[in-house]
């Protein structure tokens, strides 16, 4: 069975003085034309922001697999065009890759509203009961039931919102992505 490939993003951020914008733009266009001729090339996107202290250019290349991106990154054509691009003074150049995009690209791996509701109900019941037992041990009996319930509900909401729901959602998404991948292989 062939191994399933995933799209890979290569993101480059460059900062430079505005006086070099045209030269960098021309060099980048030549680099992008060379990338477009490579196997697995899916496209690119540029975003230029001009500020008083210079320009920031974010370039995103997309390849169909890590292997094809690495082939491009190790190519003589890329090296030649990068050398031309790097001749222009730049404040910074940063390069990052993102290749675990299955959860974003595979709609079968997303979480539905009903699943979120089920996760919320589960944690409300479990944490509510646990917090009730903790409150019996920790909170003084002099605390009125209204304030006691308000405190427990507040703690429950904070725990679910900032810890248990995000963690559960990520875990469920990963589990669904695994089953989705297995289903595609079979």
Image (cartoon, grey):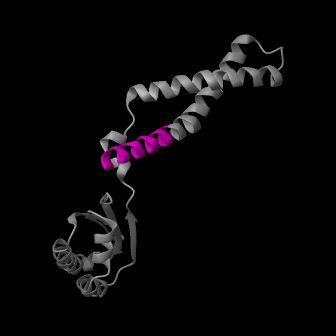
Image position, residue 24 (x, y; %): 24, 78
Q: Residue at x 37, y 60 (%)?
A: 99
In terms of secondary structure, what is the magenta stretch mainly? helix
At a point 46% along the width and 25% down the height, the residue shown is 117
Q: Position of residue 5 (x, y in %)?
A: 31, 59
Residue plotted at (28% across, 75% down): 18
Query: Residue 142: x percent and y percent?
Result: 83, 14
Q: Residue at x 65, y 22 (%)?
A: 128
Residue 105 can be seen in this image? no
Question: Is 84 placed left or right of 147 in the picture?
Answer: left
Q: Nearer the viewer, residue 25 or 81?
A: 81
| Image height of 137 relative to 105, above or below | above
Residue projecting furthest to the top? 145
Residue 124 screen position, x and y as percent: 58, 23
Res. 150 image quadrant: top right
Horizontal side of 110 relative to 127 (left or right) equals left
Q: Is residue 87 above or below residue 170?
A: below
Magenta stretch contains residue 175? yes
Asked which quadrant contains residue 84, the reply is bottom left
Q: Nearer the viewer, residue 25 or 107?
A: 107
Which region of the structure is painted magenta? 169-186
Specify whether residue 84 is painted magenta. Answer: no
* Quarter of the image that includes the N terminus: bottom left
Q: Is residue 175 visible?
A: yes
Across the whole image, how many numbered discs are drawn on residues?
0
Q: Nearer the viewer, residue 86 or 99?
A: 99
In terms of depth relative to the viewer, which is nearer, 180 or 49? 180
């Amino acid at each position: 069975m062939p191994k399933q490939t995933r799209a890979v993003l290569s993101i480059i951020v460059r900062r430079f003085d505005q006086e070099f914008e045209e030269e960098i733009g021309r060099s980048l266009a030549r680099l992008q034309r060379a990338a477009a001729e490579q196997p697995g090339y899916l496209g690119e996107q540029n975003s230029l922001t001009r500020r008083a202290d210079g320009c920031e250019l974010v370039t995103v290349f997309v390849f169909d697999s890590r292997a094809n991106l690495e082939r491009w990154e190790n190519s003589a054509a890329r090296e030649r065009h990068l050398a031309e691009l790097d001749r222009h003074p730049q404040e910074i150049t940063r390069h990052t890759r993102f290749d675990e995009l299955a959860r974003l690209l595979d709609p079968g791996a997303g979480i539905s509203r009903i699943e979120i509701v089920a996760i919320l109900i589960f944690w409300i019941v479990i944490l509510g009961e646990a917090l009730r037992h903790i409150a019996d041990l920790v909170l003084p009996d002099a605390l009125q039931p209204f304030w006691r319930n308000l405190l427990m509900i507040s703690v429950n909401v904070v725990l679910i919102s900032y810890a248990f729901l995000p963690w559960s959602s990520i875990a469920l998404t990963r589990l669904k992505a695994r089953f989705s991948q297995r289903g595609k292989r079979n």
